[in-house]
Amino acid sequence: MPHPMNHFPILDGFTPLEPLPRLAEHLGMKSLWIKRDDLTGLMFGGNKLRKLEYLIGDALSKGCDLVITGGSPQSNHARLTAAVANKAGMETWLCFAGRHMGMRQGNLLLNHIMGATMFTTGVYGSNNLYQAMKEKAAEAEKEGKKPYTIPVGGSTPIGDYGYLRAWKELEEQREMKQIPPFDEIYVAAGSGGTIAGLLAGIHLYPQKTNLMGISVWESKETLYQEIQDFTSQLLSWLGHDQAVSMDALQLFDQFIGKKYGVPSEAGNEAIRLLARLEGIMVDPVYTGKALSGLIDRARKGLLKDKHVLFWHTGGTPAVFTHASSLSQDEA
Ligand SMILES: *Cc1c(COP(=O)(O)O)cnc(C)c1O
């Protein structure tokens, strides 16, 4: 496989792969594990760092001195882009959806502390935001800067490649620890690039594993199309032209709750359960909802004899922007 040359290293070795015996027992499951991509090493961690190792590597190789990206004001991707850009000695401009950034808490507080330049755009949706970033990039060029623009979620073939590598990491780690292949792997899905990278990994290094993508944002039909496109873009960028098999993928959109960014009852319950049984934090926007999908299936008896992995993708700074919802007493 051709290896992208340009890699800006952030992760130092493998992220932990650990059993969750107390949660497994509580849910009546045979085997439950967690992959700790919340511990990826910079500014509270998260899945976006695996993408940014290659995206910022690419930016540096092109001689860029400014990174432009965006998302919602509480975007984990925006926060981690600012962190990696600072480490690489580049400037960061963040373009946020809507007209108001909201409370300077969580990710927004961290961006402020890191000295990122932040803008509101008045627009919503990944494509409109990308357009707004492109306009900012044109302004920056007029000022003599060399901008590198990253779409929402860092989901490009270069970024998603980080999760192809993560699949390989999991396989190596499993073999070293003599852990059998997982039957099901649960992952939160936003823009879809993380799952696309993992699917490409399964395509190149096959394994009898089902990827269970829990959408926090879009319908499963829309998400499926995006993941399929991202996966085939990544594989053809790597020189593999055969059609991708989507057989390993199952998507769920019934755990979104009211909408993206709004905590759900089941998600908050999942947050409390993992914190109380295992001392690990998940977040109300992504990973809590993904875990609520796993819990729902376990309670329906579907995971009793399964060997299951929950892939923790980070997002924990968002917890502090949802203090009022999370501090209510449970029903
Ligand atoms: C961005 C994000 C995801 C989703 O990753 P995508 O590649 O956009 O699907 C999941 N969890 C957390 C915490 C995230 O920040």
Image (spheres, rainbow, N blue to C red):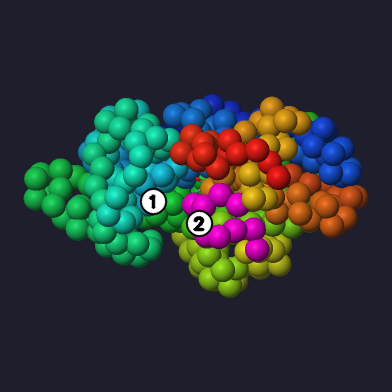
**Which numbered circle lies on residue 96?**
none
- At horizontal 50% and vertical 62% (from top left) the residue drawn is 230
Would residue 217 appear left or right of 103 to someone viewing this image? right
- Chain-order first, disc 1 or disc 2: 1
Q: Quadrant of the C terminus?
A: top right
Mark 1, residues whose alpha carbon is within 10 Å: few (<14), some, or many (≥20)? many
Residue 274 falls in image quadrant: top right
The disc labelled 1 sits on which kind of residue?
Ser
Q: Mark 1 points at which residue?
A: 72
Q: Position of residue 58 (x, y in %)?
A: 35, 44
Label 2, secondary structure: give it. Answer: loop
Number of numbered discs overlaid on the protein picture: 2
The magenta-colored residue range is 254-264
* Residue visible at 9% across and 50% down in the picture: 142
On the rendered structure, is 196 left or right of 106?
right
Question: x%, y% of residue 128?
Answer: 31, 64
For image coordinates 39% across by 54% down, the residue present is 152
Quadrant for residue 228, please give it.
bottom right
Q: Is residue 276 above or below residue 73?
A: above
Residue that label 2 marks: 260
Residue 262, magenta (yes or no):
yes
1 and 2 marks in contact (CB < 8 Å):
yes
